[in-house]
Amino acid sequence: MSLKSTIRAGVDTAFRSLSDLVQIATFDEELVSGFDFVGGDVNSTLELKAVEMIPIEHVTADGSTIRTKFIARSIDFDISKYSVFTVNSIKYQIESFESYEGAHILTAARLSNV
């Protein structure tokens, strides 16, 4: 088994072991299919992507903004394409992230309840 496969298997095991902490985040992805040069419009559709995440830390930095750190499974998921996601009807904005094989660690600020 390659190192990449071993790491991904470890991430799978961790998420299975912590299944009671796993939450499903919904990311909105705009899929662009073309551009209408006559009308000047982008042809696109909105697709929702569900990703398993585990919240690991809640921080209130300035007394009003609640920031949360999450571990997200990253298999077939490019976090750099997104800026906003929703977990349990709460909308978050990604402030920073670190990418590793099989997982992302991201810090996100709570925007609002949707």
Image (tube, grey):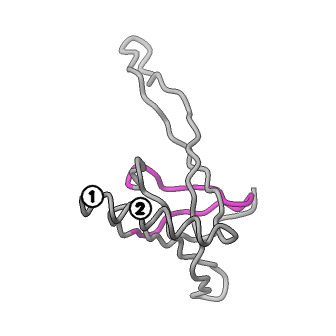
Point out the image quarter for the C terminus.
bottom right
**Figure check: 76 above or below 72:** above
In terms of depth relative to the viewer, which is nearer, 99 or 102?
102
Residue under the point 57% across and 71% down: 109
Residue under the point 66% across and 71% down: 21
Q: Amino acid at mark 2?
A: Ala
Query: Which disc number belongs to residue 42?
Result: none
**Figure check: 83 above or below 67:** above
Mark 2 or mark 1, which has the lower sequence index? 1
Residue 79 belongs to magenta span: no
**Figure check: 35 above or below 102:** above
Asked where in the image residue 79 lies, by quadrant, the reply is bottom left
In terms of depth relative to the viewer, which is nearer, 34 or 38?
34
Q: Which residue is mark 1?
A: 1
Residue under the point 64% across and 56% down: 24
In terms of depth relative to the viewer, which is nearer, 15 or 29?
15
Q: Are marks 2 and 1 in contact (CB under 8 Å)?
A: yes
Q: Position of residue 40 (x, y in %)?
A: 41, 20
Q: Which residues are magenta?
A: 80-97
Q: Amino acid at mark 1?
A: Met
Q: Position of residue 81 (x, y in %)?
A: 40, 49
The main secondary structure of the magenta stretch is strand
Q: Secondary structure at mark 2?
A: helix
Point out the image quarter for the N terminus.
bottom left
